[in-house]
Image (cartoon, grey):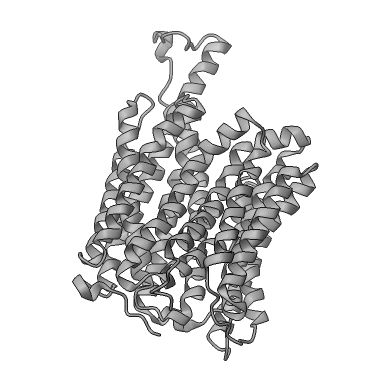
Amino acid sequence: MEHGHLHRVPITISVTLATVLQAVDMTIANVALPHIGGSMSATLEQMDWVLTSYIVAAAIMTPLSGWLAGRFGRKRVLLLSVIGFTVSSMLCGLAQSIDQIVLFRLLQGASGAGLVPLSQAVLLDINPPERHGRAMALWGQGVVLGPMLAPVLGGWLTDNYSWRWVFYINVPFGVLAAIGLMVYLRETEPRKTSFDFLGFGALSIAVGALQLLLDRGELKDWFASPEIWVETGVMAMALWVFLVHTFTAREPFVSPVLFRDRNFAIGNFLIFVVGVVLFATLALLPPLLEDLLGYPVTTAGIAMAPRGFGSFVAMSIAGRLIGRVDSRVLIGAGLGTTALSLLLMCSYSTQMPQGLIWSTTFLQGLGTGFAYVTLTTVAFSTLAVQHRSEGTSMFNLLRNIGSSIGIAATSALLTRNTQVMHERLASHIVPYGGQIRLPAPYSFTSLAGLTALNAEVTRQARMIAYNDDFKLMFLMTLSLLPLLLLLRPRRGRSEEPLVME
């Protein structure tokens, strides 16, 4: 353990930089995609692989990062991850064809997969138990704020410079993080453990197939496509093999001992659902503001800024309250505030004032900030030190899978419910005896008028579909509250994590 570490500040800065790098890069390239496609003369199918290659590679390599850190030393693996991520980012910016970008994004996802979980493990190790709350608050700010700031940063870099700067921006920060880790971080003692090829292979295939079907489902019209059926079948079979092997093998790739810890097991389930809600709303709000309400990109970014501010405030406060207030109360308050924000979002309309957007996004940032930091701290409070690297890898893998499922599910429901509501609304718009008169530009008698009327019906139907998505996430968030009773109650000084040396 490194509780008395003299270089805590530079190490914290270095691993926080690494965390922000990976968190930002998960979404920053989305804004630049149209510009990349235009300069490379790429098809929509090819552009889809720019995102898919990164997501799949990161998902497969995330659980492996824990084993690698235990086998070869955490400093060595984390340092190589930072260097690999920085170099592949530079190569993405230098790419001259769409095939090169896809290849380099694959390398970027694979090398960056370990940045977040290993950074989390380092912060837990270099801080004494009573400082874990503050350490996780700082780490959580990088994880949560990164995807929030990425679209605005990506849009600004693309508009003012070039899409290549979306990747070049990683290089100086990657170099600083690598130097800090190289100089200040101590190496952990490697453990000689055998590698479970079957367990890793089955888990990799299951996670990779799941990410593929979630990422390409909407493009392929879901189960109307044979590709999606194949990916679903492969995922189910690989997952079954992984689970059977994990509970029967002598030294499985993922140790079942992890999930015998009640706080860790419940924490993983909760973070999975929090990932669904947090990242699904992040994905839904920009198109709602830009496409439905007609906000410019910059205005949409400003409208969502209170969410980041709310998260920052909540995480700073939660980091100080952990250890003084029952963690179940803090998580419950965070989930309750998040549920309230989603309930208010159910009242969104095409005529809503911008103040409603500001207030709801701020409340949601406040709620998710409280829940995220406290949950992250509690999940590892009773987990043995030797399982931290593996535990943080699984914790972040489940969060990422939750975010992928949340984004895919809410997008699919949005499309389906828009069609259903369009049909219902349109059935009530009839010219009774030809006597009804509509204001311009709507009309029953001209093609332009009918087109304008249909566009408005579609707009209203889509708004109702957004409200249905928010209502679903509101119910999901409320359903988590009873699970908090299963967490081990820890209050006051007893809140400090039990650390096994």
Q: Is residue 489 visible?
A: no
Q: Is residue 376 above or below residue 301?
A: below
Residue that appears at 38% across and 62% down? 136
Number of marks in the rendered image: 0
Look at the image and tell me in which quarter the N terminus lies.
Answer: bottom left
Residue that appears at 39% across and 74% down? 3
Residue 482: percent from the left, percent from the top? 26, 65
> Based on the displayed image, in which of its 4 quarters is residue 469 positioned?
top left
8 and 95: which is toward the camera: 8
Q: Can residue 91 be seen in this view?
A: yes
Residue that appears at 35% across and 40% down? 361
Look at the image and tell me in which quarter the C terminus lies.
Answer: bottom left
Residue 29: percent from the left, percent from the top? 61, 43
Residue 318: percent from the left, percent from the top? 28, 57
106 and 163: which is toward the camera: 163
Residue 147: percent from the left, percent from the top? 49, 47
Q: In this view, does 161 lie above or below 21?
A: above
